[in-house]
């Protein structure tokens, strides 16, 4: 009997995110679940004046999502993906992740414990910590494989 049908996995280029993807793939195979991969761009207001920088960020994020979805395809796991951008209504990465989880009907979030954070993330608390505090869904945190 499957407990989970749709797993949301936030990804960045960190080692922890890679380990979270692998755990999610294993669980998705076991549960016959689909995975929805998300990457959130947190674009600082000053960067908005530089469209070529935003284009480069988008392109890099799309490559990351495509590579991750391709890895899932190798294991025959059904996937969807989304590139999200923070905005004034949802200014933090965790806001976008939780909104997306609701929008896609996720019933589990699997995230790495340490992503590619910034000083703001350190000061305000990491995304993983915020997910555990704010999510109404179960959250599985996966540390790096050290």
Image (cartoon, helix red, strand yellow):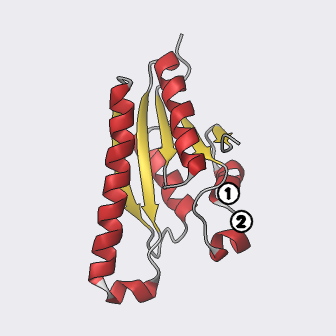
- Residue at the image point whose x is 45% and y is 69% from the top: 86
Circle 1 packing at 10 Å, graded few (<14), some (14-19), many (20+), is some
Q: Is residue 49 left or right of residue 42?
A: left
Give the quadrant of residue 69. top left
Q: Quadrant of the C terminus?
A: top right
In the rendered structure, the answer to whether residue 65 lies left or right of residue 140 reads left
Q: Residue at the location (55% across, 68% down)?
A: 92
Instruction: Tell me where residue 27 appears, x and y as whole percent.
Output: 54, 24
Determine contact: label 1, label 2, CB under 8 Å.
yes
Q: Residue at x 55, y 54 (%)?
A: 14
Residue 81 x, y percent position in the rendering = 35, 45
Q: Is residue 81 above or below residue 108?
A: below
Sequence-first tag of 1 and 2: 2
User: Is label 2 in a helix, a strand or a loop?
Assistant: loop
- The label on residue 125 is 2
Question: The N terminus lies in which quarter of the figure?
Answer: top right
Q: Which residue is mark 1?
A: 130
Crowding around mark 2 (Cα neighbors within 10 Å: few <14, some 14 to 19, many 20+) is few
Farthest residue in the top direction?
A: 1
Q: Nearer the viewer, residue 129 or 11?
A: 11
Say if residue 132 shows up in the picture: yes
Element on which disc 1 rests: helix
Provide residue 44's location: percent of width, then percent of height.
47, 81
Residue 106 vertical position relative to residue 53 in the rendered view, above or below: above
Relative image position of residue 24 (x, y in whole percent): 53, 32
In this rendering, the answer to whether 77 lies above or below 114 is above
Task: Give the camera-side residue of 57 and 30.
Answer: 57
Quarter-of-image position of residue 53? bottom left
Mark yes or no: residue 78 visible: no
């Amino acid at each position: 009997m499957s407990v989970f049908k749709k797993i949301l996995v936030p990804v960045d280029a960190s080692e922890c995110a890679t380990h979270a993807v692998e755990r999610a793939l294993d669980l998705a195979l076991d549960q016959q679940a689909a995975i929805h991969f998300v990457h959130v761009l947190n674009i600082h207001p000053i960067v908005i004046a530089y469209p070529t920088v935003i284009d480069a960020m988008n392109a890099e994020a799309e490559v990351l999502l495509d590579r991750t979805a391709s890895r899932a395809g190798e294991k025959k796991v059904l996937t969807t993906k989304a590139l999200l951008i923070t905005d004034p209504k949802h200014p933090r990465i965790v806001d976008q992740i939780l909104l997306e989880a609701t929008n896609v009907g996720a019933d589990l979030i699997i995230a790495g414990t340490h992503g590619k954070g910034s000083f703001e993330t350190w000061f305000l608390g990491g995304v993983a910590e915020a997910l555990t505090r704010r999510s109404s869904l179960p959250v599985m945190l996966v540390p790096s494989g050290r």
